[in-house]
Image (cartoon, helix red, strand yellow):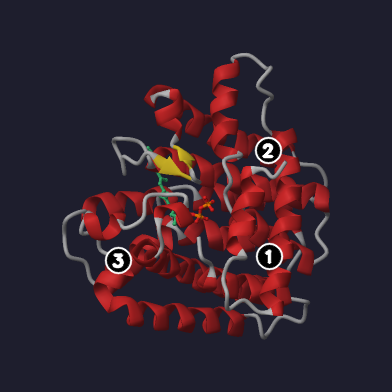
C-alpha cells in the first residue's frame, strides 16, 4: 500500500517539464524519505504506550505525508562528509519533529486557524485544541531527547548539534522569533527587508540548521561550514519565495493545505511585493547563489545542487 508520504513524493513527479536530473532527485527523496520514516517510527513512542492518545496525535501529523525536506537536506549534507548514519539519521529526524510541531501549532485557531495540512484535517480538528498543543510540545521535547540519545559522534559535535537545533527553534532570528514578527506585522505593510527578516527566521532558520547539522555531524571544517551556511540561507529564502508562488498558483489539492490564503488574508508576501514574475526571478537568483556557495567545497555536493533546484521547481 502506498503511504501518505510516498503519495506526496509521487505528486512531486507530476511536472511535465521534468528532466532526467529531477527524476534522480525524486528517487533520492523517495529513498531518503523512506529511511527517515523508518527512523521516525523507531524514535517516536508507540501508540500502545500510555497515554496512547498523545502518541496517536504526534504520529498522526508526523506520518501525514510531508516532503521531509529538512531531514533530507541534513542527510545530503552529512553524506557529502561521510557522516555516520546512526548519528546523522536521528539528528535529521529531530528536525522533522520540530518542523511538524511548528505546523501543528501554526494551524491552531489562535494562529493561522487552518483545517487542512499535508492533505489531511489538521491535528486540532481531529484531536481537539488541547491535545494538538500537547502533541506539538511533545514533538519538540522528543526532538531534544532524540538528539541527546543518538549514538556515535564525539561529545563536542553532539553538544554543538544540540545547541544549533535549540537556537534554530528559538526566538533570535529563528523559528519562534519569525512567527512573532509574522504576527506583529499582520495587517501592516512591510518592506522587502522586513519580509526577508521574517522568513530568514520563520522558514529559513530550520533549513539553514539542517545543512549545518549535517555538516557538523560529518566533521566539516569551519570554512566548509561557512560556505554551507550561505547555501542553507539562500535555499531557505528560495523555499519561501517558492512557497509564496505556490500559494498563489497551485490548488489546495496539489498543496495539501489551503491555497490562496495569503492573498485572502492580505498577507505580505513576495508576490504582493514583487509580483509573480519578480518572485520567480528572485527564486531563480537565490537558487544560483545557493549553488555558487558550494563551489569552494571540495566534496560531492551534486545532491545539494539538485535539492536547491527542487526547492524552486517543486509543485507542492
Ligand atoms: C510556540 C505557540 C507556538 C507556536 C509556534 C513556530 C511556529 C508556531 C510556527 C512556525 C511557522 C511555520 C509553520 C513555518 C513554516 C513555513 C512553511 C513554508 C512550512 C511548510 O513546509 P513544507 O512545505 O511542508 O516543507 P511539508 O508538509 O512538506 O513538511
Alpha carbons under labels 3 and 1: distance apart = 28 Å
Q: Position of residue 193 (x, y in %)?
A: 29, 72
Alpha carbons under labels 2 and 1: distance apart = 27 Å
Q: Which secondary structure lies at badge 3?
A: loop
Q: How many marks?
A: 3
Q: Is residue 219 left or right of residue 247?
A: right
> Residue at the location (56% across, 31% down)?
58
Q: From the Cβ of disc 3, is ligand 1 less than 8 Å away? A: no
User: Dividing the picture into quarters, in which one does residue 73 lie?
Assistant: bottom right
Q: Nearer the viewer, residue 147 or 23?
A: 23
The label nearer to you, 2 versus 3, is: 3
> Residue at the location (20% across, 59% down)?
266
Label 1: how many Cα within 10 Å (few below 14, some 14–19, many 20+)? some
Q: Is residue 297 above or below residue 139?
A: below
Label 3: how many Cα within 10 Å (few below 14, some 14–19, many 20+)? many
Alpha carbons under labels 2 and 3: distance apart = 35 Å
Q: Which residue is mark 3?
A: 269
Q: Is residue 152 left or right of residue 224?
A: right
Placement of the N terminus among the 4 image quadrants:
top right
Instruction: State which tag comes first along the sequence, 2 or 1.
Output: 1
Q: Position of residue 304 (x, y in %)?
A: 67, 72
Q: Is residue 288 above or below residue 234?
A: below
User: Dividing the picture into quarters, in which one does residue 188 lie?
Assistant: bottom left
Label 2: how many Cα within 10 Å (few below 14, some 14–19, many 20+)? many
Q: Nearer the viewer, residue 261 or 42?
A: 261
Q: Nearer the viewer, residue 75 or 275?
A: 275
Q: Is residue 188 above or below residue 125?
A: below
Q: Position of residue 253 (x, y in %)?
A: 45, 52
Is residue 306 in view? yes
Instruction: State which tag comes first along the sequence, 2 or 3.
Output: 2
Q: Which mark is residue 26?
A: 1
Q: Which residue is mark 2?
A: 146
Amino acid at each position: 500500500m502506498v503511504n501518505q508520504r510516498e503519495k506526496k513524493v509521487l505528486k512531486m513527479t507530476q511536472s511535465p517539464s521534468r528532466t532526467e536530473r529531477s527524476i534522480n532527485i525524486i528517487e533520492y527523496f523517495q529513498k531518503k524519505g523512506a529511511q527517515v520514516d523508518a527512523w521516525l517510527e523507531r524514535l517516536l513512542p508507540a501508540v500502545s504506550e500510555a497515554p496512547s492518545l498523545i502518541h496517536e496525535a504526534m504520529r498522526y501529523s508526523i506520518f501525514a505525508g510531508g516532503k521531509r525536506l529538512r531531514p533530507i537536506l541534513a542527510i545530503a549534507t552529512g553524506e557529502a562528509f561521510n557522516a555516520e548514519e546512526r548519528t546523522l539519521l536521528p539528528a535529521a529526524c529531530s528536525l522533522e519533529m520540530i518542523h511538524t510541531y511548528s505546523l501543528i501549532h501554526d494551524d491552531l485557531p489562535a494562529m493561522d486557524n487552518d483545517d487542512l495540512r499535508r492533505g489531511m484535517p489538521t491535528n486540532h480538528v481531529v484531536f481537539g485544541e488541547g491535545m494538538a498543543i500537547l502533541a506539538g510540545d511533545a514533538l519538540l521535547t522528543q526532538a531534544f531527547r532524540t538528539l541527546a540519545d543518538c549514538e556515535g559522534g564525539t561529545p563536542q559535535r553532539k553538544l554543538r548539534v544540540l545547541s544549533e537545533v535549540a537556537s534554530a527553534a528559538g526566538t533570535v532570528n529563528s523559528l519562534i522569533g519569525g512567527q512573532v514578527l509574522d504576527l506583529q506585522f499582520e495587517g501592516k505593510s512591510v518592506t522587502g527587508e522586513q519580509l526577508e527578516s521574517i522568513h530568514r527566521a520563520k522558514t529559513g532558520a530550520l533549513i539553514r540548521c539542517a545543512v549545518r547539522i549535517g555538516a557538523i555531524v560529518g566533521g566539516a571544517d569551519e570554512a566548509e561550514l561557512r560556505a554551507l551556511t550561505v547555501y542553507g540561507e539562500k535555499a531557505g529564502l528560495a523555499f519561501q519565495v517558492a512557497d509564496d508562488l505556490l500559494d498563489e498558483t497551485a490548488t489546495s489539492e496539489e498543496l495539501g493545505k489551503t491555497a490562496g490564503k495569503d492573498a485572502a488574508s492580505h498577507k505580505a508576501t513576495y508576490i504582493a511585493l514583487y509580483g509573480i514574475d519578480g518572485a520567480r526571478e528572485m527564486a531563480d537568483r537565490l537558487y544560483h547563489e545557493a549553488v555558487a556557495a558550494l563551489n569552494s567545497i571540495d566534496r560531492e555536493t551534486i545532491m545539494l545542487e539538485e535539492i536547491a533546484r527542487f526547492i524552486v521547481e517543486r509543485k507542492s
